[in-house]
Image (tube, helix red, strand yellow):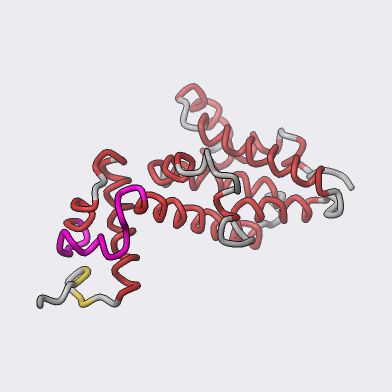
Amino acid sequence: MKEETVGGRPYHHGDLRRGLIDAARRLLECEGPSALSLRAVAREAGVSPAAPYHHFKDKNELLEAIAEQGWDLLGDMLAKARIESGSNYGPLALVGVTYVRFAREHPALYRVMYDRSRDREALPDRQHGHNGAYDRVRTALVQAGLDPTDLVGLELAAVAAWSAAHGLAEMACFKQFQPLKDQLGGEEAFLRGVFEHMGIFAEGPKR
């Protein structure tokens, strides 16, 4: 029986799953969701056409795994942004900039993440516990001054902050904003300026 390999190396069981997801993300970013199939992913990963079926029943399960990886990646980036926040950024403004940067750097992945999440009862990054992207935003809100015991206020503020970041991620690429970006000194300065003109990002809600 021929031994399967990923990237020319024999794989372990868990490595194949990761290798297939990585291959699917490459196809997704280069060619879009329509190019994804288990056969195409197997070809991209350099394994037999049957290999993906050991881990994914169909394309739908593969897309779920890709979206889950995307939410994990976004959560990690937001956590790092909070750690790196300094005098030039408020903690929430940096979280917002990081969110938009993620959406701009991974556009196809970003679309899949939301396409797979709209009809879920739970927020996507909460399906496997806390400390996901949404909870990173909640933590940043508390750090910015929101009363952690005001659960309704905290939830509303998190939705507001997330919605603002999502909206700017959708609009930041508009060509009409290029003169303003140039005037401010570039894309990141533009993003930060927009967020800092929203009260919740500028100083954080008051206790």
Residue 152 magenta-drawn? no
Q: Is residue 76 above or below residue 203?
A: below
Relative to 58, 174 lies left or right: right
Is residue 184 or residue 159 the one in the foreground? 159
Residue at 20 percent across and 76 percent down: it is 9
Dividing the picture into quadrants, the one containing residue 41 is: bottom left
Q: Most extreme residue toward the top, as rendered?
A: 176
Residue at 64 percent across and 49 percent down: it is 94
Q: Position of residue 28 (x, y in %)?
A: 31, 46
Relative to 133, 42 lies left or right: left
Is residue 105 or residue 196 the one in the foreground? 105
Residue at 22 percent across and 61 percent down: it is 45
Relative to 36, 167 lies left or right: right
Relative to 63, 43 lies left or right: left
Count of numbered tags: 0
Q: Most extreme residue toward the right, as rendered?
A: 207
Q: Position of residue 38 (x, y in %)?
A: 24, 52
* Residues drawn in magenta: 44-60
Q: Position of residue 200 (x, y in %)?
A: 75, 39
Q: Quadrant of the N terminus?
A: bottom left
Q: Is residue 63 above or below residue 118?
A: below
Q: Position of residue 181 (x, y in %)?
A: 53, 32
Residue 49 magenta-drawn? yes
